[in-house]
Image (cartoon, rainbow, N blue to C red):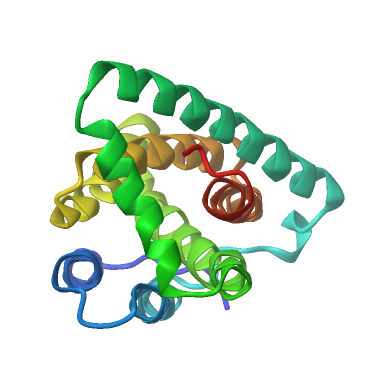
């Protein structure tokens, strides 16, 4: 499928649905977190493909790009490891809010959660937020403004959680993966980075 140019209406519909899905998942908590997030990201990915086409090229899937993604995941993990120490020193609310994020691990077995992170939510979020939304924003507003706009929306959609640390983490991660996509032009690098980072920080080497 070739890459298409989504309309403003399609962008608004997709982003609005993302806010609704995140509110249902983080706010209402009607379903198991991993089931709810998996369904939400799957639907958004389908919309991204339908409106904007598939942004992953076969030529991107190389050992070199995998290593770039691995290195990017390690760098981002180091940023969050330091950020955890600094935030718990500066803010009294940081520790309980970070602990509540890790609390959702109790809603599934570690192996199953890792599979969801590796093969559903991480690739899907990159296809939607970077390959679809950021690509459109950069085409419309230019590289810098498009990158910042996409990162702000990625952070803003997490506001419904009521968790400041989660919102801040999403914004930082959005800036990082958005910059990675901007500079490399490869959604595969971003997918590898996102997938390895989430499994690393959430399952294998939690910062708390």
Residue 76 in the image, given as x and y percentages of width and height: 55, 33
Q: Quadrant of residue 5?
A: bottom left
Residue 42 in the image, given as x and y percentages of width and height: 43, 79
Specify whether residue 29 is in view.
Answer: yes
Q: Residue at x 65, y 35 (%)?
A: 74
Residue 156 in the image, given as x and y percentages of width and height: 20, 48
Side (left or right) of 55 relative to 165: right
Specify whether residue 140 is in view.
Answer: no
Q: Residue at x 59, y 44 (%)?
A: 185
Side (left or right) of 163 relative to 126: left
Q: Nearer the viewer, residue 9 or 171?
A: 171
Task: State the residue lying farthest toward the right.
Answer: 63
Residue 200 in the image, given as x and y percentages of width and height: 61, 48
Q: Nearer the viewer, residue 59 or 95?
A: 95
The N terminus appears in which quarter of the rendering?
Answer: bottom right
Relative to residue 5, is residue 38 depicted above or below? Answer: below
Q: Residue at x 37, y 63 (%)?
A: 104
Q: Nearer the viewer, residue 46 or 31?
A: 31
Tag count: 0
Relative to residue 171, is residue 54 depicted above or below? Answer: below
Q: Residue at x 20, y 26 (%)?
A: 92
Relative to residue 195, is residue 28 depicted above or below? Answer: below
């Amino acid at each position: 499928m070739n890459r298409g140019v989504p309309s403003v209406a399609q962008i608004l519909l997709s982003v609005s649905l993302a806010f609704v899905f995140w509110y249902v998942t983080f706010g209402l908590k009607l379903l198991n977190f991993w089931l709810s997030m998996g369904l939400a990201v799957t639907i958004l990915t389908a919309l991204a493909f339908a409106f904007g086409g598939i942004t992953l090229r076969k030529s991107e899937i190389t050992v070199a790009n995998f290593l770039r993604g691995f290195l990017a995941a390690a760098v981002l993990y180091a940023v969050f490891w330091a950020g955890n120490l600094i935030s718990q020193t500066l803010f009294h609310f940081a520790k309980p809010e970070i602990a509540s994020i890790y609390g959702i691990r109790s809603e599934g077995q570690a192996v199953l959660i890792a599979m969801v992170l590796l093969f559903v939510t991480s690739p899907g979020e990159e296809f939607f937020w970077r390959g679809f939304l950021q690509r459109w924003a950069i085409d419309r507003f230019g590289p810098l403004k498009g990158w910042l706009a996409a990162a702000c929306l990625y952070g803003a959609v997490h506001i419904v959680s009521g968790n400041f640390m989660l919102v801040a983490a999403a914004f930082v991660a959005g800036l990082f993966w958005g910059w990675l996509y901007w500079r490399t032009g490869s959604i595969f690098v971003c997918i590898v980075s996102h997938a390895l980072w989430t499994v690393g920080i959430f399952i294998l080497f939690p910062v708390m």
